[in-house]
Image (cartoon, rainbow, N blue to C red):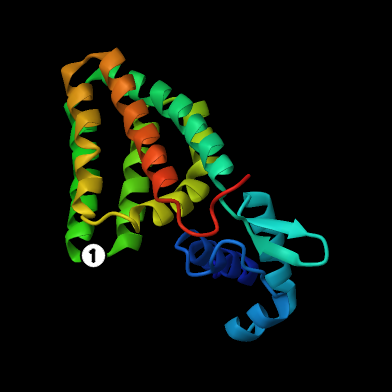
Amino acid sequence: MGSMRKPLAEEVHARLHRMIVDGEIPQGARLVEAQIAKDLDVSRAPVREAVNRLIQDGLLESRQYQGPTVVQLTLQKIKWLYDLRVAVECVAVREVTRRARKSDVRLLRLSVADIRKHARRGDLKAVAEAESNFHDTLCQLSENPYVQSVNASLSALVRMALVLDNAAYANPELIAEEHEPVIAAIESGNEDAAMSAISEHILSSLNNFQFRAPAGTSGK
């Protein structure tokens, strides 16, 4: 039959996915299928299918008497998420440092340059996307399929956390600077230093987030 446009449910899923990850649909918000169908000018069937996929993605929760609701990243959930990030990215950075390829370092520096560029423009959504890209790139460069798989499953939730975290920076360019020690450690070829750098980067971000937690993210 030749190439066809993406199924409507897939388009609705992609659009809602991005709106949730970028914070356009806030955490804790209830999704009303009829309203979404009306807003997107589609029938309810593709919306229902997209919502079910978003529940599988972990971005929506199905609450009794409330229907599908955007996941609320509490401090406890963010702690769990960031602890897992440390475990996964320590494996990734060890492999990248062990190989010490100049091409890998160049790709990571390009990601940091993107963070800095968007920070200077004050585009915090783009900053979060570029920062997420840095960590995704690190995991891809590890060439470990299990690291890549786990990272892919966490990526959307990490982006949601980054959107909240980065909004509190007085100077968003500091977000780019926080990634430089990781690259320096990789360039040094010291695996222990690289694992320490990525761990400190992720967990210091968590500590900052706890200190200046946005409204609605406290508790368990």
Q: Can residue 1 be seen here?
A: no
Q: Residue 90 in the image: state x and y as whole percent.
A: 40, 23
Compared to 200, does 162 lie above or below? below
Q: Is residue 180 left or right of residue 145?
A: left
| The C terminus sits in image quarter | top right
What secondary structure is marked by label 1? Answer: loop
Q: Badge 1 local density, few (<14 within 10 Å), some, or many (20+)?
A: some
Q: Is residue 202 left or right of residue 41?
A: left
Q: Which quarter of the figure has residue 89?
A: top left
Q: Which quarter of the figure has residue 39?
A: bottom right
Residue at the far right in the pictured view: 65
Residue under the image location 30 percent in, 56 percent down: 127
Q: Is residue 138 left or right of residue 220?
A: left
Residue under the image location 32 percent in, 47 percent down: 131
Q: Can residue 83 be seen here?
A: yes
Q: Compare residues 140 and 76 and report the one nearer the observer.
A: 76
Q: Compare residues 47 and 211 and report the one nearer the observer.
A: 211
Label 1 sits on residue: 122
Q: Residue 86 in the image: state x and y as whole percent.
A: 44, 28
Compared to 72, does 102 lie above or below? above
The amino acid beneath tag 1 is Gly
Q: Residue 57 in the image: state x and y as whole percent.
A: 62, 50
Residue under the image location 56 percent in, 61 percent down: 27
Q: Which quarter of the figure has residue 135?
A: top left
| The N terminus sits in image quarter | bottom right
Q: Residue 21 in the image: state x and y as whole percent.
A: 49, 59
Residue under the image location 34 percent in, 53 percent down: 166
Compared to 178, does 61 lie above or below? below
Q: Is residue 95 left or right of residue 38?
A: left
